[in-house]
Amino acid sequence: MRFAAFFGAGLSLASLFSAVASVAAEEAFVRDPEVIATATFPEDNTFNHIVNGQKNTITITLENKSNQNLTLLSVAGSLTHPDTNALVKNLTSIPFGNVLLAEKLKINIPYTFYSQFKPGDHRLNIWVQHSDGDKVYTVDAYESVITVIEAPLSIFDLKMLSTYLIVLAILGGAGYYTYRTLAPPKKKSKKTPAQVSAPVGTVTATGAGGYQEEWIPEHHLKKAKKSAGGATSGTSADELSGAELSATEGRRRKGKK
């Protein structure tokens, strides 16, 4: 009888401890706030691409399904190897400065990060941190394989145009310097005006109005010839009139005799 009584008391104590443990576990489970976080790419990015050299934006939807107010702390992410989960790089962590996440509230949070990674497949991880008093909780918002691609080139890209102009200016300057160094321009020779040499010997006049025509410009010679022609005709006429006068006087003298 005593053994049965002790055995019954032991079972009662065991059941009591089991009930207390289950109640404590249930209370601990209930204390964990229920928060759901999801992340989606923009509608124009249907293939979940991350573009290098650009800011990539992902929208995080956060819903507080608990019956208590929580505090939103931050959103962060990382890139890992798709097969080994080895860390590639941590992404930007955006703090929110203790934003109130009220009960039964659903909000959208834009998460933007800058990409400069090796093109190819990577595993993207994004998580949200919130707190309830002194306890901090982490909720996964996104975990999937994405593809990192290079930005498409455009001839109207201002950055590319400025880069092209700088490269062309450098190449042009180097080419001009090389040309001036290897093939310097020829110097232009200055033409000196021909000097008129002085006549050799003395210039002698031939007759009363004689001169050497070879030293006189041609246009002066033409004028001189014209004037000379007129003077000659005048002189011959004077000479003829004088001869006639002398002949007439001679005839008169013979008639008087």
Image (cartoon, helix red, strand yellow):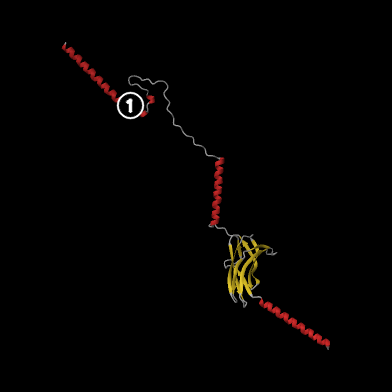
Instruction: Determine whether, in the image, residue 16 is placed left or right of residue 126.
Output: right
Q: Quadrant of the N terminus?
A: bottom right
Which residue in the structure is indicated by mark 1?
224
Q: Secondary structure at mark 1?
A: helix
Q: Residue furthest front?
A: 134
Residue sticking out furthest to the top: 257
Q: Check the image and report above or below for 82 versus 166.
A: below
Report the front residue among 140 and 4: 4
The residue depicted at 18 percent of the width and 14 percent of the height is: 252
Is residue 98 positioned above or below 184 on the image? Answer: below
Q: Which residue is at the front of the view, 172 or 89?
A: 89
x and y, in percent, of residue 240 in the image = 25, 20
Residue 118 drawn at (x, y percent): 64, 59
Q: Residue at x 56, y 45 (%)?
A: 175
Name the residue at the left extreme. 256
Instruction: Rate crowding at label 1 as few (under 14), some (14 to 19) or many (20 or more) other CA atoms within 10 Å.
Output: few
Q: Residue 143 sits in which quadrant?
A: bottom right
Percent coordinates x, y for residue 185 in the rendering:
52, 39
Q: Amino acid at mark 1?
A: Ala
Please state the horizontal and vertical placement of residue 134, each as a whole percent of the image. 65, 72
**Which residue does the image show at 18% across and 13% down from the upper left?**
253
Task: Name the foreground residue: 145 vs 250.
Answer: 145
Q: How many marks are shown on the rendered structure?
A: 1
**Height in image: 103 above or below 228?**
below
Q: Is residue 28 left or right of residue 193?
A: right
